[in-house]
Image (cartoon, rainbow, N blue to C red):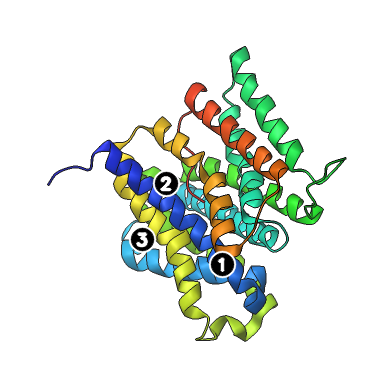
């Protein structure tokens, strides 16, 4: 069987990013029905069911150390999604993803050694300051939403670190268990917010679409593509996530951004691209 080429693998990763941000846009449409925690619980629970059925993780035995790593990985994932969806309730998708991206960007910048590397740190700080709702020329962002997005970014950094320890590259069963743990964490918050509305048959098709677009489809595409593209190239591609989020927010949700917000997002994307291309790193940031 012919192996996928690098350009085809790049196309698969790009398609996965489009699916991820499209799923986030659809998830925002669920907020009036079940709230942000409810949408988070539905996404993670349905995604976990899909991944568990597909990869049957019960066939693999884990020792105590591996279980601890998986639980930390899943806990970081669940918290990241709860914070991120809560942020989406008050700030635009593109801005939320850009602020959240400070997490994996911080992990990448932790490898900075050369003086030139600190250009990317400065660029990231500039983008961060531009997006903050402070000072003159404020972008009008909700401070609480900004704080929640930054908390999501901190959890994303933990997700990367704990994901490496759990061995996410070693088998899809780990990811299935991790998403399952994340769903268990998010479900009580969803139930407390939405109650029996989570079982409303009218919203389940949308919720399943969100789960597939945001988790199952991107993960499956990356599983096919990652063995055939360099890790650094994957990291460079992932740097475009905030730009895809801004485009998805504009097209699907009608979230037009100010020139300052676009500039701030561009600065963070450029910092991520530069850091990924020039700073030594062990693994690319996983997909959220």
Side of 177 relative to 141 (left or right): left
Residue 155 position in % (x across, y down): 63, 48
Given residues 54 and 56, the one toward you in this image is 54
Which is in the foreground here, disc 2 or disc 1? 1
Side of 196 relative to 3 (left or right): right
Corner quadrant of residue 186 = bottom right
Q: Is residue 38 visible?
A: no
User: Dot 3: what SS?
Assistant: helix
Q: Residue at x 64, y 20 (%)?
A: 118
Side of 3 relative to 171 (left or right): left
Mark 2–mark 3 distance (CA, rounded to whole Å): 13 Å
Tag 1–tag 3 contact (CB < 8 Å): no
Q: Residues within 10 Å of mark 3 (few under 14, many from 20)?
A: some
User: Dot 1: what SS?
Assistant: helix
Which is in the foreground here, disc 2 or disc 3? 2
First of labels 2, 3 by sequence position = 3
Q: Residue at x 63, y 47 (%)?
A: 100
Q: Residue at x 72, y 54 (%)?
A: 148
Tag 2–tag 3 contact (CB < 8 Å): no
Mark 2 lies on residue: 168
Q: Is residue 28 visible?
A: yes
Residue 167 position in % (x across, y down): 42, 44
Mark 1–mark 3 distance (CA, rounded to whole Å): 27 Å
- Checking the image for residue 27, the label placed there is 1
Residue 226 position in % (x across, y down): 34, 42
Q: How many marks?
A: 3
Mark 3 lies on residue: 57
User: Dot 2: what SS?
Assistant: helix
In the image, residue 78 sits, relative to residue 203, either above or below, namely: above
């Amino acid at each position: 069987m012919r192996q996928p080429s690098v350009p085809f693998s790049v196309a698969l990763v790009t398609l996965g990013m489009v699916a991820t941000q499209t799923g986030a846009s659809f998830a925002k449409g669920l907020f009036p029905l079940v709230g942000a925690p409810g949408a988070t619980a539905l996404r993670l629970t349905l995604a976990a069911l899909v991944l568990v059925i597909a990869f049957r993780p019960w066939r693999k035995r884990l020792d105590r150390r591996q279980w601890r790593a998986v639980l930390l990985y899943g806990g970081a994932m669940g918290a990241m999604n709860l914070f991120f969806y809560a942020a989406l309730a008050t700030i635009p998708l593109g801005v939320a993803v850009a602020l959240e991206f400070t997490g994996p960007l911080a992990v990448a910048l932790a490898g900075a050694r050369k003086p030139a590397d600190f250009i990317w740190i400065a660029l990231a700080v500039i983008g961060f300051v531009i997006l903050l709702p402070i000072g003159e020329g404020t972008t009008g962002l909700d401070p609480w939403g900004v704080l929640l997005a930054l908390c999501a970014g901190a959890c994303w950094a933990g997700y990367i670190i704990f994901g490496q320890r759990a061995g996410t590259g070693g088998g899809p069963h780990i990811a299935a268990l991790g998403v399952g743990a994340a769903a268990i964490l998010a479900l009580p918050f969803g139930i407390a917010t939405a109650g029996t509305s989570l079982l409303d048959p009218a919203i389940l098709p949308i919720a399943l679409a969100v789960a597939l677009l945001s988790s199952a489809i991107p993960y499956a595409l990356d599983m096919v593509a990652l063995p055939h593209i360099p890790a650094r190239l994957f990291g460079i591609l992932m740097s475009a996530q905030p730009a895809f989020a801004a485009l998805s927010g504009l097209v699907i949700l009608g979230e037009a951004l100010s020139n300052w917000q676009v500039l701030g997002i561009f600065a963070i994307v450029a910092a991520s691209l530069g850091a990924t291309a020039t700073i030594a790193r062990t693994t690319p940031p996983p997909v959220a």
